[in-house]
Structure formats: C-alpha cells, structure tokens
Image (cartoon, rainbow, N blue to C red):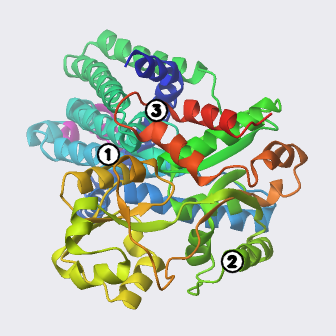
Amino acid sequence: MNSRLHSALRMLPQYLSQHVLLSAAALALGIAVSLPLLIAARHSARVRWPVLAAASLIQTVPSIALLALFYPLLLGLSALTQRLFGWRFAALGFLPSLLALTLYSILPILRNGITAILNLDPAIMQAARGVGMTSRQRLLRVELPLAAPMLMAGVRTSAVWVIGTATLATPVGQTSLGNYIFTGLQMEDWIWVVFGCGVAVALALVTDQLLALIELGLARRRPVLAWLGVCVLLAGVATAAAVPLRAVQRGGYVVGAKNFSEQYILASLIAQRIRAAGHPVTERTGLGSSLAFQALAANELDVYVDYSGTLWNDVLHRNSTPSRAVMLRELTRTLRERYGVTLLGALGYENAYVLAMRPGEAKALGVRTIADLARVAPRLRLGADLEFFARPTWRDLRHRYGLHFRTLRQFEPTFMYSALMSREVDVIAAFSSDGRIAADHLVVLKDPLHVIPPYDAVILLAPRRAQDPVLRAALAPLIGAIPVGLMRRANYLVDRPHAKRSARQAAQWLARAIHLP
C-alpha cells in the first residue's frame, strides 16, 4: 500500500498541474463566451431562448462523448490547415478537452446572469433611465454590478462542473487527475482511484471557496475580499504553470496505449527502451482503439502496439479471416500505402478474443467449443468489454455459430472478469494473453470454424517516424521476443488481486525476462 501511495504522490505535481491549467483555461474561456451572450440576451427574448436552449442542449450530451467527438473534428480541421497553409495543430490532448469543457461551463454562468438581470428591481432600472443613463451605462453601472453576486454563483457552479468533468479528459490524451482514476479502475488499484478522486474533490472545494470569497466581496462591496480571492486563484494557476511538463520536447517521442493493463505495460516497456537510448518520452495512455490509430496516422503519436485482427477489421474493414502470415503481409503493405503507417513487426504473441467460462459450469453443460455453447446460449449471459459487441468479430461469431444469449452486458475489462467469477455473467469475451485466465482456471472454448481472426501484437510507427533510426534501433530487440506465457505473467503482475505491481514495474520485469540489453 505504501509503495502505491508513494507512486501516486510522485505523479501528483504532473497530474494536478495539468488538471489545474486545463480547468482554469476552460473556465476563463467559458466566462469570455458567456458574458457577450448574456449581454445580447438579457433584454431580447428572441436571442435569449435559442441561446439558453443551445447551452442546455450541450449539457444533455454525455461529457465523455463530447470530449471524444471533438477529436475527429479537430483532426479534420488540422488536415485542412495543413493543405491550405502548410501547418497543422495538435488535435489530441489539450485542445479537444479545452473546447468540450468550455461548452460545459457556459450554461450555469449564462443562466444565473440572465436570471439575475431579469429579476432586478424595476424601480432601479426606471431610476437609471430617469437620470439619463444610456443603455451601455445602465449595463456597466447598474445591471452587471447588481447581478454580480448571482453571476459569481453561476461561475462557482461552472468551476466545480469543469474540475469534475476534466477527469474524463484522459481518454483523449490529456493528462489530468483522471489518469489516477482510469489507470486505477483498469488495474483495480483502489488507492489510485481514491487518491485521484480525493485530490479532484479537494481542488473543487478550494476553488469554490476562493470564488465564494470573490462573490462575498462583490455582494458586500468590499473589493479587498474580491481581489484577495482573485490573487490566490491566479497564484495557484501560475504555480501549476511553473511545474515542469513531461510533454513532447524537441526531438522527443510520444508513445500511445489503449485502455487496458497489457497496453500500459507495453507502452512503459517501449518508453523505457527509448529513454535508455537517451531521448525524452511522453506516454499517452487510456486511448480508444480508433482514436489511437487516428492519432498515430496523424503523427500525434509516434508509436504504439495494436493487434492484427483489430487493424484488419476496424481499420481496413476486411471481413475475411486469412492466415496469420497473409494478414500480416497485407496489413504491412496496405497500412503503408493508405495511411503511411509502418508495421515494424510482431512482438511474438497473440492477444485474441476468446470466449471463456467458469470450469464447473462448462463441465456441467458439456461445453468445450463455441459450437457447444450455441446449444445452451439462450439461457446464459454474455459479458464483454466496451468494444466487443461493435466489432465484426462478434457479428461473425453470432452469424456463423447462431449464438443467441439471454442477455449481453458490457464492462471495463477488469470488471468483466470479476463479473464472471461473481456469477453475474456466465460467459465472457476474454483476452488470450490475460493472466487471469490461468489464475481463475477459466475454460477457453475452441473455435472450430476459425471465425476469430489472428490478433498478433504488432508495433506501429507514425508516418514521420517510418525511417527513424533511433526508434527502430530501440524497438528492434522487441520483435518476436515476447512469448505469450511471459506476457500473461507480466499482465498478471498488474492484475492480480494482491501484491500488485505498477505497469512500469511489470515492464521492467518483462524486459529482464526476455533478456533485453
């Protein structure tokens, strides 16, 4: 426990500083957008209704979906600026997170401000007109000062929302306190989960109280209190900005990873190899499959590990199931021609989808193959990760074997195994390189029709790194060097219930096990 807490504390300056900068930028931009809208809408129902309706509509979009949707939009815009002006911007990480959080921050500020102005005492407004104030003077000297306390209440609400929602920026490549939460959930490291949540809560509470001090100063006409709150907030943001950022330095490399234990381990292993060659590295973990490949093809990642079956089905949209050699050869050629992506080589093991059951239940039902499973499937419950049911692999399995389960449920991979062992589901779409299969003595069902394609782990390089000598030299010893048995053991170091290791420690163990120089 002490080692995990120490590990969490070691990452705190990096995660907290990035969370503060993202939240502060989004809140500042939200205020900058909201105030002109407030001014335009305060006395015009024709403007007020669509503005508030649009802001309310944004709140109905799930926050993680809004964060994810901005990435392909920005990626397209970046490609357009590249073609038109010869430059492009980073579409992964800070920018999509900033834009999504800004949109989420608008509604409380806008609604509170409009409500405050509309409910001002009519006598005060009449008096202002009576002394000859212009519309601009009434706004600056009467409406905004009187509405300021309630407007600040909206800012406080918005700030808490933004700080909380910023933890969801991790899947789009932005470092935040969400790194603790997503990594901890995946690895069942509850110390990291609780630590990340606790720090996010503390940050929200401190920010809320400082904004409350500003609100109190405005309400009581005590500028000293308001300025004190402002100065402390600015000092906090300045301190966060001063923390050294482990970002992409000049000549540095960006290593990507998807959102499960094996990917964290492999990303750490690759990063260690590059650092050993004397080069800085940034790790962007917790990415979805499609987003990771898009980011690589757009040169926003330099290298990551993917799986041949995933690339075959999801990137090339192929429905056939060729042999392993044919698939790798075709992937190598097509990824290079179509996307400029280099398939450097296979690591030496496969992480395929497999259907697995508890041994006692499989024996009682007489199920050894997926064909056997089809006979009893209508009374069983199937659990899978968040992507499986949208993949061609599931469609083909269902069609070829006639699989019809009683219920289908989706889980984070870690919780999927727990659901099977706690009998919440009867069958899971597991991963063949997962150490929990052996640890839990699960029965892996055979695929007699060979519907599931090969899922060899392969190293992919971004177009700009295709001939990079440093990267190729650092990664060449990994090609064909990792047998599935060692990968399972490395995964289980991270996934086992007790005496867990971090992904970095598991990567170091794996490097020693395969005798890397």
Residue 327: which disc?
2
Amino acid marked by disc 1? Ser
Amino acid marked by disc 3? His
Amino acid marked by disc 2? Met
**Residue 80 found in image quarter:** bottom right
105 and 480: which one is in front? 480
Q: Say if 253 sits above or below 446 in the image.
A: above
Q: Tell whether 422 sits left or right of 72.
A: left
Q: Nearer the viewer, mark 1 or mark 2?
A: 2
2 and 212: which one is in front? 2
Q: CA distance from mark 3 to mark 1?
A: 40 Å
Residue 104 rendering spot, x and y as whole percentages: 35, 49
Which class describes the residues within 10 Å of circle 2: few (<14), some (14-19), or many (20+)?
many
Residue 196 rendering spot, x and y as whole percentages: 36, 30
Residue 257 rendering spot, x and y as whole percentages: 58, 49
Q: In the rendered image, which quarter contains the C terminus?
A: top right
Reading the image, the residue beneath label 3 is 19
Residue 135: which disc?
1
Task: Write down the region rendered in magenta.
Answer: 128-141
Residues at marks 1 and 2 touching, judged by CB atoms closer than 8 Å: no
Q: Say if 253 sits above or below 333 in the image.
A: above
Q: Nearer the viewer, mark 3 or mark 1?
A: 3
291 and 391: which one is in front? 391
Res. 173 in view: no
